Image (spheres, helix red, strand yellow):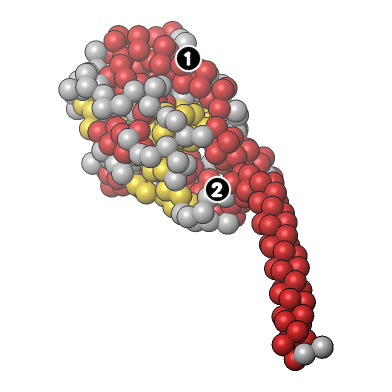
Amino acid sequence: MSSFRRHHTTSESQTLNDAVLISRLRRTLVCGAIAIAWLGGFSAPAKAQGAYPTKPVRIVVPFAPGGTTDILARVVANELTKSFGQPFIVDNRAGAGGNIGSDIVAKAAPDGYTLLMGTVGTHGINKALYDKLPFDPVKDFAPITLVAGVPNVMVMNTEKAKAMGIRNVADFITYAKAHPGKLNMASSGNGTSIHMAGELFKVMTGAYMVHFPYRGSGPALMDMVGGSMDVMFDNLPSAMQQIKAGKLVALAVTSATPSAALPGVPTVEQAGGPALKGFEASSWFGLLAPAGTPPEIVNSIQREVAKALSAPAVKESLLAQGAIPSGNTPQEFAKLIDAELKKWAPVVKVSGAKVD
């Protein structure tokens, strides 16, 4: 065989071998791509389900630091940070009875990264109280869960109560009627349950007090302790520290039954006589997201909040401050909001309170 034929045969054999190798390589690459795509089809949804949150989450508190809304938000934020492994950060945006902070959340992207610690004021009272509410408490929000229910407590500066000879609710009514317009009533803001509890008390007893709305319970309590304010129907958790310190005296709780956190302190109805029969003005606090937030995110947050609130250490701490932890479902929380809107509308009307 000539050298040319040998070279030609060798070239043909090499070309054939190369073609076989390329074909095998192509099949391997194609099969590998199919396998990756097939596995990706299964792994992608799992990743999507476990993806939230991938960055810090903001919990807007529509009142100043130091009040019950702020206290509960920080408890929840701390627990969710541990559960999800991402920071849950409290952002205080006070003003307009909680409307400023609530409106921020109502207009935020519905992606689960901006939440609201709403209250009976923002989602039960303000719709009837304000002529121009910048948001709809039902349509603009996705309820997540009720965090806690809280009785309010009628408190006075301890030294001022002694100086006025006020030892109980009956004494307070007598003094207020004898000195119309001389008593200053502090609240955490227009439309809060603290404000409306005072308005309801005024309507039912005929005792007149001058209302001073603050940007949250924190600053209002400072003036209560300082003595420039006379009375406040504050949420129990935020007032508890000053009551225990003896700087404020608790005359009564505004719930239908006494609070285990304040042994010996009667309800307003029990202490006020026939004029206050049926008096009840409790508060509640719950997490909400902007309307349109994916249900899987809403449900995920609700589950973790419910788990945290049922933990013995958290539950006992809240109960000791007078808060009753909940953690109910989004559907149950939505029903509560609807019921509270219907409950407070006639109360606001009877009180005559109105804010432009």
Above or below residue 62? Residue 82 is below
**Label 2 is placed on what type of residue?**
Tyr
Q: Secondary structure at mark 1?
A: helix
Q: Earlier in the sequence, mark 1 or mark 2?
A: 2
Nearer to us of marks 1 and 2 is 2
Q: Amino acid at mark 1?
A: Ala
Q: Position of residue 336 (x, y in %)?
A: 51, 20
| Picture quadrant of residue 239 | top left
Q: Determine the residue located farthest toward the right in the rendered image.
A: 1
Residue lying at the far bottom of the rendered structure: 3
Q: Report which quarter residue 273 is drawn in.
A: top left
- The quarter of the image holding the N terminus is bottom right
Q: Position of residue 352 (x, y in %)?
A: 24, 13
Residue 308 in the image: state x and y as whole percent.
63, 44
Residue, disc 2:
52
Residue 122 in sight in this render: yes
**Residue at 55 percent of width and 53 percent of height:** 81
Pointer 1: what residue? 339
